[in-house]
Image (cartoon, helix red, strand yellow):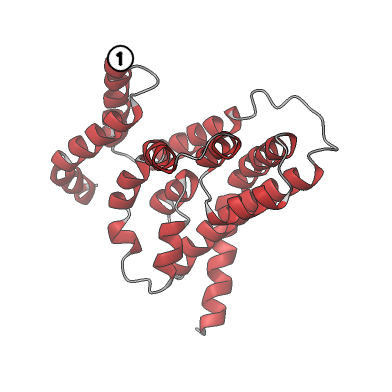
Amino acid sequence: MSESTRRKSALKAAFPHTIPIFAGFWFLGMTYGIYMNVSGFAFWYPMIMSLTIFAGSVEFVAVNLLLGSFHPLQALAMTLMINARHIFYGISMLDKYRGNGWKDIYMIFGMCDESFSINYTADIPKDIDRGWFMFFVTLLNHFYWFFGATLGGIFGSLIHFNTEGLDFVMTAMFVVIFLEQWLKDKNHVSALAGIGVSVLCLLAFGAEDFMIPAMAAILGVLTLLRRPLEAGGERQ
C-alpha cells in the first residue's frame, strides 16, 4: 500500500469519528468569533488565535486579557491552571503517540479534550495506519474550531442570537462518548473508579477547584489498578 493510499484510508476512517466534534466546535467556535467581534477585535484575531492557540477556554479568557492591562505572569499562570488537565492527557497518550515521526509534534500541539477522547478510545481497524488516523482526528478537530471561529469573527456583526446554553453541546458530547465506551467495554472498573473519585473530589474541593485533584487522583488509582485491569482484560 502506497503512502498516499494509507493517508486517504486513514482520513476516511477518522472523519466519521469527528462528526459530533464538528457540531460542537462549529457552534462554540462561532460563539467565540462573535464574542471577539463584539469586543472590538477584527476577524483575523479569532482566526489567528484559533489557529495558533487552539485552546477554547484560554481563547475566551484571552479576550479579557487583551482588553485589560498586560500582565504576562498572570496570563501564564491562568493558562497553566486552565489547561493543567492536558498533563494527564499527555501521560495517558505516551505509548499511543510514540513512533509516529513528525506527526507526533502536531498531535501533541493539537491534543484537545475531544481529540484525546477519540484517539484514546477509538477502535482503529488493523488495516488503518494508527499514526495517520490520530493525526487526521487532530487535524480535523483543529480545522472545525478554526473554521467556526473565523466565520464568527467575519459575520459576528451580522448575526444576532442568544448563545446562552450552547456550551452544553460539549457536555452532551462527552456523555455520549462515555456511554459509547461503557457499552464497548466489558470491565467497568476504571469508569466507576473515575466517577467515584470525581464525586469525592467534587465534595471535598467544590465545583470550582475539583478538576485537577480529581484527575491526579484518577491517575493514581488507575496506576495502582493497572495490573489487575490488564490481567482482567487478558482473561476476557
Q: Residue 66 vs residue 188: left or right? A: right
Q: Is residue 140 above or below residue 226?
A: below
Q: Using residue 14 as the reference point, say whether residue 100 is left or right of it.
A: left
Would you say residue 199 is visible in this rendering?
Answer: yes
Q: Extreme right residue here? A: 158
Residue 61, image x and y in percent?
53, 35
Q: Nearer the viewer, residue 69 or 78?
A: 69
The image quarter in which residue 68 lies: top right
Report the residue at 37% width, 71% height from top.
Answer: 100
- Picture layout, residue 120 above or below residue 163: below
Farthest residue toward the top? 203
The amino acid marked with disc number 1 is: Leu
Answer with left or right where residue 211 lies relative to residue 133.
left
Q: Quadrant of residue 4?
A: bottom right
Q: What's the residue at 55%, 56% (across, down)?
A: 52
State the SS at label 1.
helix
Q: Nearer the viewer, residue 27 or 1?
A: 27
- Residue 85 in picture, x, y percent from top left: 35, 40
Residue 175 x, y percent position in the rendering? 49, 31
Label 1 belongs to which residue? 203
Q: Residue at x 82, y 30 (%)?
A: 160
Give the total of numbered labels.
Answer: 1
Q: 102 or 59: which is nearer to us? A: 59
User: Outermost residue, bottom direction?
Assistant: 2
Looking at the picture, tell me which residue is in the foreground, 55 or 125.
Answer: 55
For the question of whether residue 125 can be seen, the reply is no
Q: Residues within 10 Å of mark 1 (few under 14, many from 20)?
A: few
**Image coords of residue 84 (percent x, y):** 35, 40
